């Protein structure tokens, strides 16, 4: 399996890139001596890892877990976030976001190329980030660059320069958010204003590469929620995650010793043929995608309902208005081993 190393102890599987000509391959777990870590690629193995309380998230640059919450505190935090993401709040946010999405989609030129990220996704996601975190739109605009710095470091966690810049930006961002659960403050602002557009960029790139799928969704709006799940599976953003064992544990027959690292290749698991029929095909009619893009079990994304709502609400007006979209220029990619996405998405369209 080809591995590119740009930093010490860094692994980037080129086949996990969305624009790769070679699809990722799910294989049995193995220990990589150079990386000093177990490599998990199969769906069943990563799902088991997500469900294991003995595994703790770590950064790629550190084999030791950071300061973690005890179980009671963790559950309390998740409960507080779930209260913020109540059905009534999601309905209100969706109503406002849908109106904005429809208005901006109508203004997109049909006669000249436009950047779907800068001209559509970014302003909508920035507005949603402001609404959810309770700051003004002007404040959101002023904080966008700092949030972008934090996101860039998450995309390439091995870059020491980016990491230092993100540490400084995080300090500045935290001073601007004072209400609500901790995870619904600056971290939520970064996720919604920066990571969300990257996720949408990957999804829309996949649709553009499969014009029949775009056109099918254009004709059948009832498939939108189902299509988003398939796009999350096929074109998910997160490439790899890292975990460490807090005690000796056996995962699907693999003995992991306390302190050992595990690298989870999420994109490979989402293309596992033992879990998905024709895994390298984009099929928006696919049912039961059950992807791992938003985690699972103890390590599921607490904001998954918000992410799904935003993806559906922002994507539909775009696809509904235009029967297809084609790339107007080559895509420049950004990010690295954490996640990778189009820097821009210039397209021309026809109604």
Image: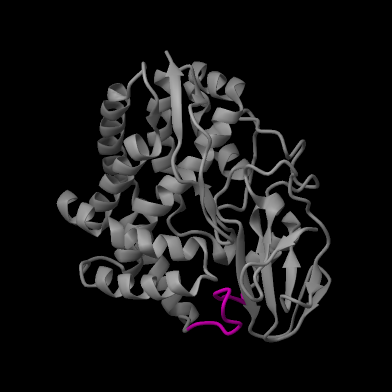
The C terminus appears in which quarter of the rendering?
top left
Q: Which residues are magenta?
A: 53-66
How did the renderer colour the structure?
one colour
Is 63 included in the stretch rendered in magenta? yes
- Give the x, y percent position of residue 281: 71, 34
| The quadrant where residue 39 appears | bottom right
Is 301 included in the stretch rendered in magenta? no
Foreground residue, 275 or 266? 266
Q: Residue at x 65, y 33 (%)?
A: 282
| The quadrant where residue 250 appears | bottom right
Does residue 54 show up?
no
- Give the x, y percent position of residue 225: 50, 34
Foreground residue, 96 or 288? 96
Tell which residue pokes out farthest to the top in this image.
351
Foreground residue, 232 or 248? 232
- Give the x, y percent position of residue 139: 17, 56
228 vs 83: above or below: above
Does residue 289 show up?
yes
| The quadrant where residue 122 appears | top left
139 vs 153: above or below: above
Q: Residue at x 72, y 38 (%)?
A: 280
- Is residue 145 rendered to the left or right of residue 166? left
Q: Residue at x 43, y 69 (%)?
A: 162
Q: Give the main secondary structure of the magenta stretch.
A: loop
- Is residue 192 rendered to the left or right of residue 233? left
Q: Residue at x 39, y 42 (%)?
A: 310
The N terminus appears in which quarter of the rendering?
bottom right
Foreground residue, 193 or 284? 193
């Amino acid at each position: 399996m080809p591995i590119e190393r740009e930093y010490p102890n860094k692994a980037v599987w080129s086949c996990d890139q969305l624009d790769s000509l070679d699809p990722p391959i799910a294989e049995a777990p193995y220990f990589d001596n150079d990386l000093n870590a177990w490599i998990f690629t199969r769906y069943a193995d990563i799902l088991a890892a997500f469900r294991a309380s003995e595994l703790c998230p770590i950064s790629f640059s550190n084999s030791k877990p950071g300061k973690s919450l005890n179980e009671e505190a963790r559950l309390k935090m998740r409960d507080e976030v779930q209260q913020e993401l109540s059905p009534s709040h999601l309905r209100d946010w969706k109503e406002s976001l849908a109106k904005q999405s429809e208005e901006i989609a109508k203004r997109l030129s049909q006669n000249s190329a436009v950047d779907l990220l800068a001209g559509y996704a970014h302003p909508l996601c920035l507005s949603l980030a402001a609404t959810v975190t309770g700051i003004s739109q002007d404040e959101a605009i002023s904080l966008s660059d700092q949030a972008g710095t934090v996101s860039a470091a998450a995309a390439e966690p091995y870059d020491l320069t980016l990491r230092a810049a993100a540490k400084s930006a995080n300090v500045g961002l935290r001073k601007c958010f004072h209400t609500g659960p901790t995870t619904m403050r600056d971290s939520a602002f970064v996720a919604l204003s920066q990571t969300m557009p990257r996720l949408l960029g990957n999804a829309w790139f996949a649709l553009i590469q499969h014009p029949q799928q775009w056109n099918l969704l254009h004709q059948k709006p009832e498939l939108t929620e189902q299509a988003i799940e398939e796009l999350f599976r096929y074109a998910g953003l997160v490439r790899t995650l890292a975990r460490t064992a807090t005690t000796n544990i056996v995962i699907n027959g693999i003995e992991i010793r306390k302190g050992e690292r595990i690298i989870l290749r999420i994109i490979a698991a989402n293309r596992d043929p033992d879990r998905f029929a024709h895994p390298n095909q984009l099929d928006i009619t696919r049912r039961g995608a059950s992807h791992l893009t938003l985690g699972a079990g103890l390590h599921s994304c607490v904001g998954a309902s918000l992410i799904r709502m935003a993806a559906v609400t922002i994507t539909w007006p775009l696809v509904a208005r235009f029967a297809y979209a084609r790339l107007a220029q080559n895509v420049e990619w950004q990010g690295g081993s954490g996640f990778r996405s189009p820097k821009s998405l210039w397209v021309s369209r026809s109604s």
